[in-house]
């Protein structure tokens, strides 16, 4: 090869067509429509469900689990009261106005005074300690 035989060719950029294949203009995308466009995105079914949820004022996604207030047997001596029920606990501000949960007395601590408990669930260990101190447990059947 001699220097006078070298040919310099000018490189021209090819026209970019549909991109992504050897099929020309549409390049496998078909014609028109959402799927033919760049960056097309089909809306997922979950979004449709979210859109149907009510978003008006006052609508709450409330937690369905119930609240639980736990008292120990040792705490009952501090009250200096013989009758303990949910209304008494509301007066002592142990419960909020909107409290809709369950109250339970557990067996941690010691009790010396006689206590009458109404409408409050009690664990077995707490029941033994309360009855040993001379107290009573009265539960009403709620339906």
Image (cartoon, rainbow, N blue to C red):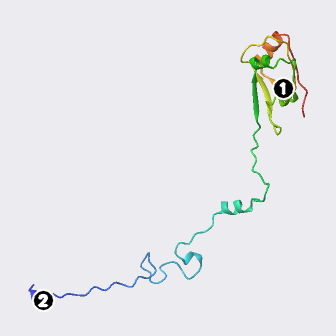
| Quadrant of image for the N terminus | bottom left
Q: Residue furthest left?
A: 2
Pick the front one: 96 or 134: 96
Q: Position of residue 20 (x, y in %)?
A: 44, 75
Is 135 on the left or on the right of 29, as rendered? right
Q: Residue at x 66, y 62 (%)?
A: 47
- Return the residue found at the far bottom: 4
Nearer-the-camera pick, 121 or 37: 121
Task: Answer above or below: position of 74 versus 96.
Answer: above
* Residue at image point 82% right, 40% down: 98
- 130 or 95, nearer to the observer: 95
Left or right of 121: which side holds 140? right
- Residues at marks 2 and 1, CA–CA distance in whole angstroms: 106 Å
Q: Give how far across and how far down residue 139 sits, in percent.
A: 88, 24
* Residue 98 vertical position relative to residue 113 in the rendered view, above or below: below
Residue 44, quarter of picture? bottom right
Q: Is residue 13 left or right of residue 81?
A: left
Q: Which residue is mark 2?
A: 5
Decide which of tag 2 and tag 1 comes sooner along the chain: 2
The number of callouts visible is: 2
Q: Residue 120 — which label? A: 1
Q: Is residue 113 above or below residue 29?
A: above
Helix, strand or loop at mark 1: loop
Q: Quadrant of the C terminus?
A: top right
Mark 2 or mark 1, whichever is nearer to me: 1
Quadrant housing residue 107: top right
Residue 30 x/y as whole percent: 54, 80
The image shows residue 54 at horizontal and vertical percentages of 77, 59
Residue found at x 78% / y 23% = 105
Q: Nearer the viewer, residue 52 or 119?
A: 119
The circle on residue 131 is none
């Amino acid at each position: 090869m001699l220097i006078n035989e070298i040919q310099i060719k000018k490189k021209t950029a090819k026209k970019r067509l549909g991109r992504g294949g050897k099929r020309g203009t549409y390049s496998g995308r078909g014609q028109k429509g959402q799927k033919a466009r760049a960056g097309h995105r089909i809306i997922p079914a979950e979004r449709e469900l979210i859109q149907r949820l009510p978003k008006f004022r006052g609508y709450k996604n409330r937690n369905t689990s119930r609240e639980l207030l736990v008292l120990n047997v040792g705490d009952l001596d501090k009250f200096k009261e013989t009758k303990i029920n949910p209304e008494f606990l509301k007066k002592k501000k142990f419960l909020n106005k909107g409290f809709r949960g369950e109250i339970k007395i557990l067996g941690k601590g010691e009790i010396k005074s006689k206590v009458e408990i109404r409408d409050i669930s009690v664990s077995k260990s707490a029941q033994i300690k309360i009855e040993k101190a001379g107290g009573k447990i009265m539960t009403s059947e709620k339906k």
